Amino acid sequence: MEIPSDNPLTYEGVTLGRALFFDPILSLDSTISCASCHNPALAFTDGRAISNGIAGRTGQRSAPSLLNIGYHYKGVFWDGRSPSLEEQALHPLNDSLEMGNHWEIIQERLLLHPDYSKLFRLAFPDASMNKATTAKALAQFQRTLISTDSKFDRVQRGETQFTPQEQRGWTIFFDAGYPDVPMAECSHCHTDPLFTNLNFANNGLNESLSLDDFPDEGLGRISGNKFDNGKFRVPTLRNILLTAPYMHDGRLESIEEVIQHYNEGGLYAENLDPNVRPLHLSDKDQQDLIAFLQTLTDSSALTNPMYYPAKK
């Protein structure tokens, strides 16, 4: 994990970030918090196809999981527009479709709150309560959201074993048994141990005869390179069976639909990732693959009391 030299993790900083993460006063109407879209019980997603903001406003994309987000050094958000968690933390506060607030209002509320002046002073004794320290605290808390205790992890540590079905699913996922066992091409993008390569890809959700035809340009809107149009951040597969619906716009409701999408090879675009191709997986192959994906469920990351609001 790359941690900025000017924002090392401290107990006090994480404590402040945790309080801010769960506090709805950061939103204009005090109705939603960061946790409204990133619920720890849902692997830090919200179970919606498209997230909602203040006043029931509909956002533009699905809320991605924050587990292991501290390792994402190639940019966060689906389109990679923020190079760091410190920079990312400020976007939802001002976005009219999310928290819709203004820093002046947030700062006044924090100053009037009975706890925050002390929490900021403890976390950043050499700095004032400001936008930068607020972002730093939120980033510190997010860097503590770690998943390392799924069955997959325990197998890697030699503490347990896969069932035969899980083992065959592992073989399909990692293309480790060809030609006797089919390849699913999953691990090119969903590389262990994070189960993402941290890159951006067009996975064939939209047919595009022209690179200018994508309904959501994704990375291309940020990079200015039209060959990046329709590319989105490769999400982690950790706790993937708990984070439906799927894709950046939540269009696929079940993991079965996701696998079927890839099995069919996706839709044409000039920049379609070359690993997205017809896979010819049988029903058994797909069920074995799902059995392996189940081993990426880390229940401890859903129940860790440090990932929830502090009890008063």
Image: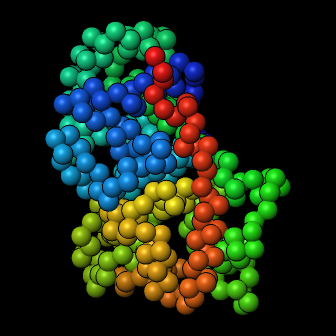
Q: Eyeballing the image, is 312 above or below 244?
A: above
Question: In the image, 223: left or right of 98?
Answer: right
Q: Residue at x 70, y 86 (%)?
A: 181
Query: Total number of numbered labels?
Result: 0
Nearest the camera: 34 or 101?
34
Q: Residue at x 53, y 47 (%)?
A: 67
Which of the 4 quarters of the picture holds residue 292? bottom right
Q: Residue at x 38, y 38 (%)?
A: 35
Taking 279 as reference, is 305 above or below it?
A: above
Q: Is residue 260 above or below residue 202?
A: below
- Tell me where residue 108 appears, x and y as whole percent: 23, 16
Place of residue 135 in the rendered image (x, y in percent of width and height, measured from the top left): 39, 30
Q: Position of residue 201 (x, y in %)?
A: 45, 69
Q: Name the spot of residue 152 as percent of width and height, x first.
A: 70, 58
Q: Give the quarter of the image for residue 204.
A: bottom left
Q: Quadrant of residue 84?
A: top left
Is 190 located above or below residue 61 in the figure?
Answer: below
Q: Is residue 245 visible?
A: yes
The chosen color scheme is: rainbow
The residue lying toward the viewer, choosing from 278 and 252, is 252
Q: Nearer the viewer, residue 83 or 307?
A: 307
Residue 218 seen? no
On the rendered image, what quadrant is the N terminus found in? top right
- What residue lies at 25% left-to-right and 48% top-to-bottom? 52
